[in-house]
Image (tube, rainbow, N blue to C red):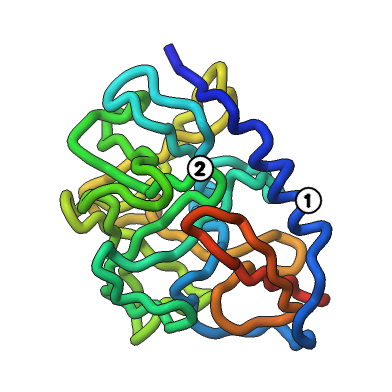
């Protein structure tokens, strides 16, 4: 049985209101290629199965019982935003490019939990369960993922992989879909080898590849999400 938390329903509404009421604080420029930066808030798109990394206040009914992580096809779901952060000891100053081979935390914006994996079987494929864990952006050492890419930095248009630092699995989707209460959402899990199921691109939406980013970008706006997240720069492409 799945279990849902209470008191979280306002999250997507709050984020939507913030996005709608933002006031520009700098001029616009064209969105182009460049590195993903520490502090960025973005969506991660699986290039093989064309779903976005997603979480919500619904817990697994088996395995760890932690908050579930899935893949969704919808491009406009507020529960698909993740923030790029360094480890608990820092090493990822806001606005600095994320290096290939760097270990980062991926923090779910609306629930404040980190992308996490551990030695529990995933519900559908029996691969390694991927969950969201911690409170207010703080979890443990199993929240760290190494960015696997070519070159010096994680480039916005490049397909990359995320390899778990603690267990070496790759963040993956292989097409299994859940029934109720999250019917149609895809299982996200860890796999031991690099393959076509574990390549991801950073994006905001399918219309113009806008960015929500902690560094520089086009159409800059600012909004407070509160808690440990402070101010987050909202970058919206003008195309």
Q: Position of residue 15 (x, y in %)?
A: 69, 50
Q: Residue at x 52, y 69 (%)?
A: 40
The image shows residue 123 at horizontal and vertical percentages of: 34, 24
Name the residue carrying label 2.
111
Res 210 quadrant in image: bottom right
Q: Position of residue 110 (x, y in %)?
A: 56, 46
Horizontal relation, residue 30 to residue 149: left or right: right
Residue located 24% across and 49% down the image: 140
Looking at the picture, tell me which residue is in the foreground, 22 or 145: 22
| Vertical position of residue 96 compared to residue 133: above or below | below
Separation of disc 2 and disc 1 at Cα?
A: 17 Å
Left/right placement of residue 184 relative to residue 151 reads: right
Q: Eyeballing the image, is 65 above or below 145?
A: above
**Image quarter of the N terminus:** top left
Q: Vertical placement of 57 versus 47: above or below? A: above
Does any portion of residue 47 appear in the rendered image?
Answer: no
Looking at this view, is 58 or 202 the one in front?
A: 58
Q: Secondary structure at mark 2?
A: loop
Q: Give the number of the disc on residue 17.
A: 1
Q: Residue at x 68, y 36 (%)?
A: 10
Q: Quadrant of the C terminus?
A: bottom right
- Give the percent coordinates (x, y) of residue 43: 56, 57
* Label ID, residue 145: none
In depth, the one of 27 and 99 nearer the eye is 27
Characterize the local packing of mark 2: few (<14), some (14-19) or many (20 or more) Cα atoms within 10 angstroms.
many
View extreme (front): residue: 227
Residue at (63% x, 43% y) in the render? 73
């Amino acid at each position: 049985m799945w279990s849902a938390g209470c008191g979280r329903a306002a999250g997507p509404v709050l984020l939507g209101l913030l996005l709608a009421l933002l006031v520009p604080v700098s001029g616009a420029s064209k969105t182009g290629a460049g590195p993903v930066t520490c502090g960025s808030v973005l969506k991660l798109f699986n290039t093989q199965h064309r779903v976005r990394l997603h979480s919500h206040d619904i817990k697994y009914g088996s395995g760890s019982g932690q908050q579930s992580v899935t893949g969704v096809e919808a491009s406009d779901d507020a529960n698909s935003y993740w923030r790029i952060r360094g480890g608990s000891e820092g090493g990822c100053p806001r606005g600095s490019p994320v290096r290939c081979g760097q270990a980062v935390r991926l923090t779910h914006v609306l629930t404040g939990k980190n992308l996490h994996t551990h030695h529990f079987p995933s519900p559908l494929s029996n691969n390694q369960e991927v969950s969201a864990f911690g409170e207010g952006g703080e979890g443990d050492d199993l929240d760290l993922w190494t960015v696997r890419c070519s070159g010096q930095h994680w480039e916005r248009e490049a397909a990359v992989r995320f390899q778990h630092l603690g267990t070496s699995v790759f963040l993956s989707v292989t097409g299994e879909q859940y029934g109720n209460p999250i019917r149609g959402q895809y299982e996200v899990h860890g796999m031991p080898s690099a393959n076509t199921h574990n390549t991801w691109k950073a994006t905001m939406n399918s219309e113009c590849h806008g960015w929500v980013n902690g560094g520089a970008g086009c159409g800059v706006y600012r909004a407070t999400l509160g808690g440990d997240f402070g101010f987050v720069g909202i970058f919206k492409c003008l195309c």
